[in-house]
Image (cartoon, rainbow, N blue to C red):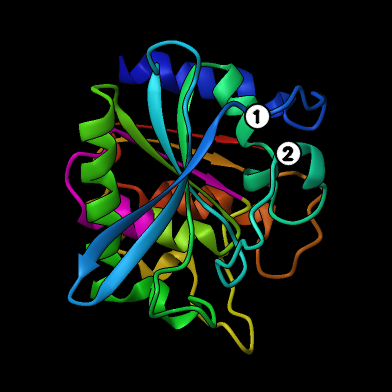
Amino acid sequence: MERAILGMFLRTLPLLALLAWSGAGAEELVTLPTRPGITQPIHVTRPAGPPVANLLLFPGGDGRIMPYRSPPNLHNGNFLVRSRDLFVRQGFLVAVFDVPSDQTAGMDAFRLSPDHVTDIAAVVAWLHAASPAPVWLVGTSRGTISAALGAAAVSGIHGLVLTSSVTRQASLSPSTVFNIMLARIAMPVLVVNHHDDACQVAVPEDAPRILEALTGATVKEAQL
């Protein structure tokens, strides 16, 4: 099952830039209590039939995605958020991770914290209750730090996809995926980069370094 899902990602992700919107399915805002007095919002879109997998998407930047709008009215911003309907049309249940109630100014430093692990674990548990399908974490840019942290520290996760991973320090946000103990990730991992990406902190040539650090991954592959 894990290899089949990984293969599906390999076929689907390169199409994201080519497909047009057809309109998202019904979306709902789910607010989960995670820590004392703290709530974690996720934006959930379900496929028409039983999900082939549950995807937890971590946007990049500081993690803030509001205002959250339906795809026809959301043409800018993080590509994972804009592409969620494409995943739903492939049969995935999609949950987009928003900032928790105590991080409304953004999650830059918070992405490496134990509290972030607690919040991710609560969302993963909710996904397992919502659907028996496997749970995969998908991050882009700075969201790869959160996705990698969850894969390394939270149980019940079946796979990880890292797109445009932050591998080099920025002056205001020095954290990278290499701040995570990548060797602890024991699941299939797909690393995706655009070979012409000019971002100075998400360098495509660093993909082999990520694969090398994933010594515990059961399957690992890079797509450039």
Q: Is residue 77 inside the magenta stretch?
A: no
Q: Position of residue 60 (x, y in %)?
A: 60, 61
Residue 76 vs residue 5, the one in the foreground: 76
Q: Which residue position is annotated with label 2?
A: 71
Q: Residue at x 80, y 37 (%)?
A: 72
Q: 30 or 197: nearer the eye?
A: 30
Quadrant holding the C terminus: top right
Q: Amino acid at mark 1?
A: Ala
Toward the bottom, the furthest residue is 171
Numbered label attached to residue 24: 1
Q: Quadrant of residue 145?
A: bottom left
Residue in front for this viewpoint, 202 or 126: 126
Q: Amino acid at mark 2?
A: Pro
Quarter residue 15 falls in: top right
Can residue 22 be seen in the rendering of this structure?
A: yes
Residues in magenta?
148-163
- Label 1: few (<14), some or many (≥20) within 10 Å? some
Callout 2–callout 1 Cβ contact below 8 Å: yes
Q: Residues within 10 Å of mark 2 (few under 14, many from 20)?
A: some
Q: Quadrant for the N terminus, please.
A: top left
- Residue 140, given in percent of the width and then of the height, sits at 58, 52
Task: State left or right for residue 48 relative to residue 204.
Answer: left
